[in-house]
Each structure stands twice: as structure tokens, then as C-alpha cells.
Image (cartoon, coloured by chain):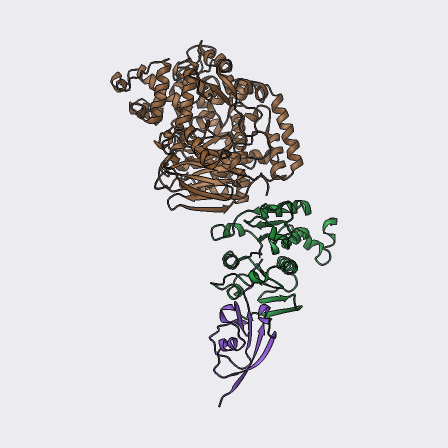
């Protein structure tokens, strides 16, 4: 077989058994790989009502058939588990080099079950898979953990690990790899922490087998060429990183400020990609086989060199907290990398806390002992709170489980800008209707990246849509959701959509794995995966009521700036989305839809 | 009729040849026996071959293992099967499984196969193949070699041949002393391959409930009947 | 009166070394299969397959007239 390795590692952490299983190739191909394969495996093996921190929850890591193959951006892998933050399926994606190395070791997927009695890490070198004592690294931050483990297992090893954030079970903790890459959202780091797993080290010496080597070479070269000629993928992103978006989003009046109380800032340029490049950038930091190289490597004011911030991070620690000190934002980003935390959720939670303080819910007495303010714009405070969240120190402990639980504890959950308890990212949906649909219906909670409608509605990819209009948005969003599921499942990076389209992904799959897909069948697989995730969530107990947006975004118009006066039209757009999906008015996929997608086995899975 | 398969005819008919593409055969072991079996099953046109072997080639394999050569020492045997079939018959699908065939992986490896071929080199594995094929209702073509000698039998679900051949506690066989010259695996592999085709096409007479015992040193071939 | 049984023994593979491939032997009534093996100096533990008239045989079984005993060493290579 080609693309796929055909092998799965299953580790029972409770009894220490390590098994290698053959990949169910038919299942893998039906759900493509990575995200799709992980989700299907998870729903087959775990009760959706499972407690995420219980031993019955499983933790799955999977690469796609293209992960590690010689095509552009083939470094990505997926973490699939039940999210302790949202209670939905967690599907967290990461890049860097770890995923490709895992394929080189000869594996498509790893399933972790149960719980280790004491902290362990897993070491993989090709065929050899071992459980090792993690007593020396438990408690270490991510860079120290990585250095230590590479010191033992060799510099060519790639390290995936959690930091103190995951060890202390923060619901905002991430799984980190290659020091500054994150499978960030949904609290997946805490699931590993709850299982006493500190790290997974991998070294692989094989290559991904290709169905047609000549064709793969040509296809890869062609697609790389397209990406290099594209203004975003070939120029904007490599030069400025995703930070290039700060000024663009702000100029459109959809940059959320002060926890979505405002949508425009005069000072946005101080934390923009342009400023980052000018003042802090040391070099680009690309993932495996990536010509886009959006990753940043920066130098802080104190001389420390570290991974630099993404757009979402610049926003969450910057304008969302009304902070415009770029070094402070860089430091907060570095702390999140070291503690293993999701930068979006952490920054947004600090912002929510600042609003609670602004409105008098959080009192001075509560934060007096910490000696740190919750004033808007206080850059030092923003950094200090980030650290306290990572270490669960003082009031930071109250914040470590995210803004929803924080706001709810004061009786005002509506000040948490979340969907399904996960913090919304850096775009105000009130003036980007299609993007707001993604926020509301995303299977893993408030998230932008599983259907990045900013592309057509703001950036004009693949065509420019009117962001204020409703018409056609639901259908368009569905296509984006399905295509993203495809890309996530192939093992490639979403940023390839700046330049590539569905036929390009079909080409790459067919060259590497074999002539199996056309446009329709590949996109349908994406639809299948999205729908399966929805079924999981319904079974887990989520309902139509959870496909919503914070009240502020539905009822309060944007106060000022280029997008003044807008609210989100979810009331109209949600039923339309359900309809184009082939779901009933409660968001339940109909029997006919399930049949069309090859999901007949799930007819009757959810009681009507 | 494609030129590629025209010389199969009329030992098998054109229609039988077409049908071969619909079958899935699992060959456990890509060494002495397995290498030849995969070569022949691929050439005759079996649609899907699952090639299972966790091992890598060593110099000692070169005397007989047809998939091995000086350029792939150290390489995965199942991967070599994939690469060989790519050149010999890219029309068929070869699923290489770089895993040990054991009680954890075994069922999933053979599930869905129309026939399983025992090309394993150890009695425990051979016993397990027998057990799992019985459990999953899949016919098994057992083969074993040692020195100038070898044996083949065909086992349908419910048959007792494997109970006779592979008793509990049987350790390694005489192959440890006698070694493995190249003609023995080639000869027995051919017999196993012919058995596979006959099982799939329901054609001719197989070695069901019989053991073919070959002695290439003395040129004696016995077929021992196993009574029920 | 001691009655002799006529039995046939077929030997395979390495058991043929230094022996014939087939023997027709007279065995005292009451002999067991294992006595046959002893007579041919074949250690019982070296026998992998023992067939008695084509069926899986037990070395302790008492022989009958015209029994055919086939013995094979373990052949396990691949």
C-alpha cells in the first residue's frame, strides 16, 4: 500500500501493554486519514458520554496518507480525543516535524488507553516502542523537556510533549511538538496529563511509499509552484507570517477589542505583522516540507530567542486585552509554548477576566494577593496572568479552566465570548456572516480554522464574497467545512488553500496513494467526516442550542469603526446551514443524508 | 484478453482469469516460500495480495529468498514485495503489512481474505494461522520446508489437518539442522500457489485432507491421506 | 501362543537416513506403536506427525493387524 503505513500502535497505559495492529485500510481510505480516521476510530471505541479525564477516554494521534510524503506542507498530524473544555469531539491539528517522523517510523496512528500509574513517556524508534519513566522531565517546561529527551534519544528525534499546563489539567492546555508547534485547542494537553503521559519521542528512518514516484515528483513541483506564485502563500505569509492579518482585519473593522466590546483599534499596527518583522523577527521557521514558511522565530527584548506569535495570538494577548506592547505579546506567546497552553483561549480568558473586573464582578480583594491588575491595556499584567494560569497560581487557578467557567462562576456566562465553552478567535463575526456560521456550528466549539470563511469574505480566496450578505453563505460554508476536513485528514496544511483548490488535493492523493478519488468523492469524504463528528456530539448530549453565538454578537451591533452597526444573522443562517447539510431542524442528519454519505450504520444512532 | 494474461489460457479460461482480479489472498511470510508465492500470485493476476512479514533481509537470505538481493539487505521484506509487484504487475494491489503475525494482529490481518497461505517459518505462527483461519472460516494452504524436504496440505474450515501437523509444544523443525537450499522453497511454493488457484476457481483436485510430502533428495513424492 | 501382527511402517524425511523408507514388520501381539519406534531406534520426541492408518495417532496405542504407521519429523521452515 502507498501513503499509508498499514500499522497502528495501541498502548494500554494501565497495564503497560504495547500492541501493534494492522491498519484497517478500507476504513482508513473511507475516512481518508488523520482527522477522519481518528474520529471514526474514536467513535467506534469510546462512548461519547465518557468523562474526558477518566481512564475510559482515549487519546488518538494520527497522520494522514500524505503526512511525510514528498508533497508540500506534508508535516501535519491530528490529535483526537474528547475535549474536557467543550465536551465535544476534540480535533486538534499541529505541524512542525513530529508528524512526518511518526510516519517515517512506520505508523499511521497511535491509540493511548487507560492511565499510567506514574508519569511516563513513550519512545519510538522505527519498530521499537517503549514506555519510559518520566520522573526526570515531569514538571519541566516544553523547551527543557525537549532538550532533555533529545539529549537521551538523539538530536534527530522529534519530541511531542505537554508542559505544566497539561500536567496541571488546565482546560486550555495544549499538546506541543518541536518546541513551538501546538495541537492547541480543546484542552487536549490535559487529557495526556490526566493519563500521566509527559511526552512521545519518535525517530523514524523509513520513507512513505508512493504509488507513482514520477507523478508525485511532478505533482509536488506543480503545486509548490502555484503556492509560490500566490500573493498570500508566496509572499504575504512568508514575509510577515499569519501576523500579516492584523492590519487587514483591523481595517475591515472586525478586530475584536476588549473582549468583543469594540471592533477596531487605532493602535493595531503596533502589534502587526509588519512591526513584528521589522522589530523582532530573526528568521522564518517552516514546518516539514513547507514552502510557505509562515512560522516565526523571534528575539525578545531580553535577548531570548523563541517561537513567534501567530495572528490569533497577537490578537488575544494584544487588542483583545487592549494591549499594544509587542514584546509583551511575544513573551506571553513564549510562556504559552513553554507551559503548553492554547494562546487563543488564554488571551481571551484574560480579556474576559478584564471585562469582569471592569464591570465589578471580580473585586480587588480577589486579586490583591497576586499583586497583578486586571486593567485593560496593562501589558505586564497580561504576561503575569499568563504565567499564573500556566502554573495554576493564585487567581490564575480560577482562570486556568477558561473564560466560560470563570464567567459562569460569577453568574454571567454571557461575558464569555465562547461557543460550546471554547473561546472565539480573532474575527468579529457580526460583520462576516459566513465566518459566524463556522463559529456557531464548528464541531469542536468556537473556532475559525475548520472552515475559514475569512478567506472568501475578506481575502477573496477563491473569490470575493460580500461579507455582510447572507445569501449563499450557508452552502459556501459547508463546502469550506468539508474541504477543510479533507485537508486535515490528508495531513496537509490549511494554508495551501491560498493557491490550491480541490482538484489539486485530488492530484496529490492519487499520485501518492493511487488513482482512487475524483473531486466529488474526495469532498464527499470530507462531508462524511464532518457529519460523523456531528453525530458524536449529538450522542455526547449537545443540541441545537449549542450551535449558537454569544448574545453580544447576536444582539448588540458593532459600536464603531468600518463595520459599525452589524450583528450576526444566525437566526436565518443556521436553519439554512442545517438544510444544505441535509439535517433536520434540530441539526440531526436525516436517514437519507446518512445513506448518501455511506454512514448507514449510524441510522438510529441518535434517538429522534 | 490482455496480453499479460494470455498465456494463462487455457490452463484457466479467460473468464476464470478475469475472476482472479476479484480475489484477495493473504500470504503470511515473505521469505523462502512467500517470495515465490507472491511472485506467482501477482503474475497470474490475483487482484489483491496481502503480504505479511515483520522482518528485514539479511545476507543469509540470499541463497533462497527471491525477494532479496544485494540492494535491499536491511530493508523490510513486505516492502520489497510491494516494490517487486509494482514492476511485475502494477495492475494488482499489494498491501504490505510490516507487522508480526501474532494473536494481537492476526485476525485483522487475515480478515476479508478469500484464502490464506502459510509461508511462515515457525510452528507457533503456523498453528496460529490454522486457528484463526478456522475461526474466520477461511481456507488455508499450509506449507513447510526443511532441507530437501517439504510438505503441503490444504485446510478448509472444520478440517482437522492442522491439529495433526502442528501440535502444541512442537518447537522448531529439522530445518534448523538441514538448512534451506533454494530449490525446496521454489518447488513447494509452486504447489501451494497451484492449490490457491484451484481453491479460488473451484477447479481440479486439491490436497484437502491429504499431505503432499516431497523428498527432493530421493525424488519421492508421497500423498498421505488423512482420514476423518 | 504369541501371535505376530504384520504392520507397515512408512518413514519420511530425515527418518529415512540410515533406514529404509518402508518396512513390513512382525510385531508381538500387545505391542504398542512406541515399541515400533524403539525397534527402529526412532526417539519418540523426534516424531512430529504420527499417523495411524491416516489418522492422528497416539504412540501408546496398541497395534492391530495390518496397521499402517507413518512418521514424520517436524518440518517448520518457510
The quarter of the image holding the C terminus of chain A is top left
- Observer-nearest of A595 and A446: A446
The quarter of the image holding the N terminus of chain A is top right
* Residue A341 in view here: no
Q: Is A53 situated above or below B35? A: above
For the colour brown, the matching chain is: A
Q: Position of residue A606 (x, y in %)?
A: 42, 39
- Observer-nearest of A30 and A491: A491
Q: What residue is at 34 percent from the left and 26 percent from the top?
A: A391
- Observer-nearest of A350 and A5: A5
Q: Which colour denotes chain B?
A: green
* Residue A159 in view here: yes
Q: Is A439 situated above or below A601? A: above
Q: What residue is at 26 percent from the left and 16 percent from the top?
A: A364
Q: Position of residue A369 (x, y in %)?
A: 26, 19
Quadrant assignment, res A462? top right
Q: How many marks?
A: 0
Q: What residue is at 36 percent from the left and 13 percent from the top?
A: A378
Q: Position of residue B168 (x, y in %)?
A: 47, 63
- Observer-nearest of A529 and B126: B126
Give left or right: position of A131 versus C14: left
Q: Is A32 situated above or below B147? A: above
For the colour purple, the matching chain is: C
Amino acid at each position: 500500500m502507498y501513503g499509508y503505513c498499514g500499522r497502528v500502535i495501541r498502548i494500554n497505559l494501565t497495564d503497560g501493554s504495547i500492541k501493534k495492529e494492522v491498519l484497517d485500510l478500507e476504513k482508513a481510505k473511507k475516512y481518508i486519514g488523520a482527522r477522519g480516521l481518528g474520529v471514526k476510530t474514536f467513535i467506534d471505541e469510546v462512548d461519547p458520554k465518557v468523562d474526558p479525564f477518566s481512564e475510559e477516554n482515549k487519546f488518538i494521534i494520527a497522520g494522514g496518507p500524505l503526512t511525510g510524503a514528498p508533497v508540500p506542507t506534508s508535516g501535519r498530524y491530528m490529535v483526537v480525543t474528547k475535549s474536557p473544555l467543550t465536551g465535544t469531539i476534540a480535533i486538534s491539528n499541529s505541524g512542525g516535524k513530529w508528524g512526518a517522523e511518526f510516519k517515517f517510523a512506520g505508523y499511521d496512528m497511535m491509540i493511548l488507553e487507560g492511565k499510567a500509574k506514574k508519569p511516563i513517556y513513550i519512545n519510538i524508534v522505527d519498530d521499537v516502542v517503549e514506555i519510559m519513566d518520566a520522573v526526570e522531565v515531569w514538571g519541566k517546561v516544553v523547551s527543557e523537556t525537549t532538550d532533555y529527551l533529545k539529549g537521551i534519544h538523539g538530536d534527530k528525534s522529534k519530541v511531542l510533549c505537554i508542559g505544566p499546563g497539561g500536567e496541571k489539567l488546565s482546560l486550555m492546555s495544549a499538546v506541543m511538538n518541536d518546541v513551538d508547534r501546538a495541537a492547541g485547542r480543546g484542552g487536549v494537553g490535559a487529557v495526556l496529563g490526566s493519563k500521566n503521559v509527559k511526552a512521545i519521542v519518535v525517530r523514524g528512518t523509513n520513507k512513505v511509499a508512493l504509488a507513482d514516484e514520477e507523478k508525485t515528483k511532478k505533482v509536488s513541483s506543480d503545486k509548490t509552484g502555484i503556492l509560490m506564485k500566490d500573493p498570500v502563500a508566496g509572499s504575504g505569509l512568508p514575509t510577515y507570517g499569519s501576523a500579516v492579518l492584523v492590519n487587514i482585519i483591523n481595517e475591515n473593522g472586525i478586530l475584536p477589542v476588549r473582549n468583543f466590546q469594540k471592533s477596531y483599534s487605532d493602535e493595531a499596527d503596533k502589534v502587526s505583522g509588519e512591526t513584528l518583522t521589522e522589530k523582532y523577527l530573526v528568521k522564518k521557521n517552516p514546518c516539514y516540507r513547507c514552502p510557505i514558511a509562515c512560522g516565526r522565530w523571534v528575539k525578545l527584548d531580553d535577548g531570548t530567542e523563541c517561537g513567534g506569535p501567530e495572528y490569533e495570538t497577537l490578537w488575544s494577548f494584544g487588542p483583545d486585552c487592549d494591549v499594544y506592547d509587542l514584546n509583551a505579546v511575544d513573551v506571553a506567546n513564549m510562556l504559552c509554548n513553554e507551559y503548553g497552553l492554547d494562546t487563543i483561549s488564554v488571551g481571551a480568558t484574560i480579556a474576559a477576566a478584564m471585562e469582569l473586573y471592569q464591570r465589578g464582578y471580580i473585586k480587588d480583594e480577589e486579586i490583591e494577593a497576586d499583586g497583578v491588575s486586571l486593567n485593560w491595556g496593562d501589558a505586564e499584567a497580561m504576561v503575569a496572568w499568563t504565567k499564573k494560569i500556566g502554573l495554576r497560581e493564585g487567581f490564575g487557578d480560577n482562570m486556568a479552566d477558561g473564560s466560560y467557567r470563570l464567567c459562569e462562576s460569577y453568574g454571567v456566562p454571557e461575558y464569555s465570548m465562547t461557543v460550546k465553552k471554547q473561546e472565539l478567535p480573532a474575527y468579529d463575526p457580526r460583520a462576516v456572516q459566513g465566518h459566524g456560521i463556522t463559529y456557531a456550528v464548528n464541531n469542536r466549539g468556537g473556532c475559525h480554522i475548520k472552515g475559514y470563511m475569512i478567506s472568501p469574505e475578506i481575502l477573496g480566496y477563491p473569490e470575493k464574497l460580500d461579507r455582510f450578505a447572507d445569501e449563499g453563505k450557508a452552502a459556501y460554508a459547508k463546502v469550506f467545512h468539508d474541504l477543510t476536513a479533507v485537508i486535515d485528514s490528508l495531513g496537509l496544511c490549511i494554508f495551501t488553500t491560498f493557491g490550491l483548490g480541490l482538484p489539486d488535493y485530488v492530484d496529490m492523493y492519487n499520485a501518492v496513494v493511487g488513482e482512487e478519488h475524483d473531486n466529488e468523492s474526495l469532498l464527499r469524504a470530507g462531508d462524511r467526516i464532518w457529519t460523523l463528528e456531528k453525530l458524536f456530539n449529538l450522542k455526547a448530549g449537545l443540541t441545537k442550542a449549542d450551535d449558537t453565538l454569544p448574545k453580544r454578537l447576536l444582539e448588540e451591533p458593532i459600536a464603531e469603526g468600518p463595520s459599525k452597526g452589524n450583528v450576526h444573522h444566525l437566526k436565518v443562517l443556521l436553519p439554512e446551514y442545517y438544510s444544505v447539510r441535509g439535517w433536520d431542524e434540530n441539526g440531526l442528519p436525516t436517514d437519507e443524508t446518512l445513506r448518501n454519505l455511506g454512514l448507514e450504520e449510524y441510522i438510529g444512532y441518535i434517538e429522534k | 484478453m490482455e496480453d499479460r494474461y494470455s498465456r494463462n489460457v487455457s490452463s484457466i479460461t479467460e473468464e476464470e482469469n478475469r475472476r482472479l482480479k476479484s480475489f484477495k489472498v493473504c500470504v503470511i511470510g515473505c521469505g523462502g516460500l512467500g517470495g515465490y508465492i507472491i511472485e506467482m500470485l501477482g503474475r497470474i493476476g490475483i487482484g489483491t495480495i496481502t503480504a505479511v512479514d515483520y522482518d528485514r533481509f539479511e545476507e543469509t537470505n540470499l541463497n533462497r529468498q527471491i525477494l532479496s538481493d544485494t540492494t535491499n539487505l536491511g530493508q523490510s521484506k513486505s516492502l520489497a514485495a510491494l516494490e517487486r509487484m509494482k514492476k511485475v504487475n502494477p495492475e494488482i494491489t499489494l498491501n504490505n503489512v510490516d507487522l508480526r503475525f501474532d494473536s494481537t494482529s492476526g485476525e485483522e490481518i487475515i480478515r476479508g481474505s478469500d484464502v490464506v497461505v502459510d509461508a511462515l517459518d515457525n510452528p507457533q505462527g503456523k498453528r496460529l494461522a490454522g486457528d484463526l483461519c478456522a475461526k474466520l472460516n477461511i481456507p488455508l494452504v499450509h506449507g513447510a520446508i526443511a532441507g530437501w524436504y517439504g510438505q503441503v496440505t490444504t485446510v478448509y474450515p472444520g478440517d482437522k489437518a492442522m491439529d495433526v501437523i502442528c501440535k502444541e509444544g512442537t518447537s522448531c523443525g529439522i530445518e534448523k539442522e538441514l538448512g534451506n537450499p533454494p530449490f525446496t522453497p521454489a518447488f513447494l511454493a509452486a504447489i501451494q500457489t497451484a492449490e490457491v488457484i484451484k481453491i479460488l476457481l473451484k477447479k481440479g483436485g486439491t490436497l484437502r485432507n491429504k499431505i503432499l510430502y516431497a523428498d527432493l533428495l530421493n525424488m519421492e513424492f508421497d500423498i498421505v491421506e488423512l482420514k476423518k | 501362543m504369541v501371535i505376530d501382527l504384520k504392520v507397515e511402517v512408512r518413514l519420511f524425511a530425515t527418518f529415512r537416513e540410515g533406514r529404509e523408507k518402508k518396512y513390513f514388520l512382525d510385531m508381538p501381539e500387545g505391542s504398542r506403536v512406541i515399541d515400533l519406534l524403539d525397534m527402529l531406534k526412532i526417539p519418540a520426541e523426534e516424531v512430529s506427525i504420527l499417523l495411524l492408518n491416516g489418522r492422528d495417532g497416539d504412540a501408546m496405542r496398541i497395534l492391530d493387524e495390518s496397521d499402517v504407521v507413518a512418521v514424520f519429523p517436524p518440518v517448520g521452515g518457510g
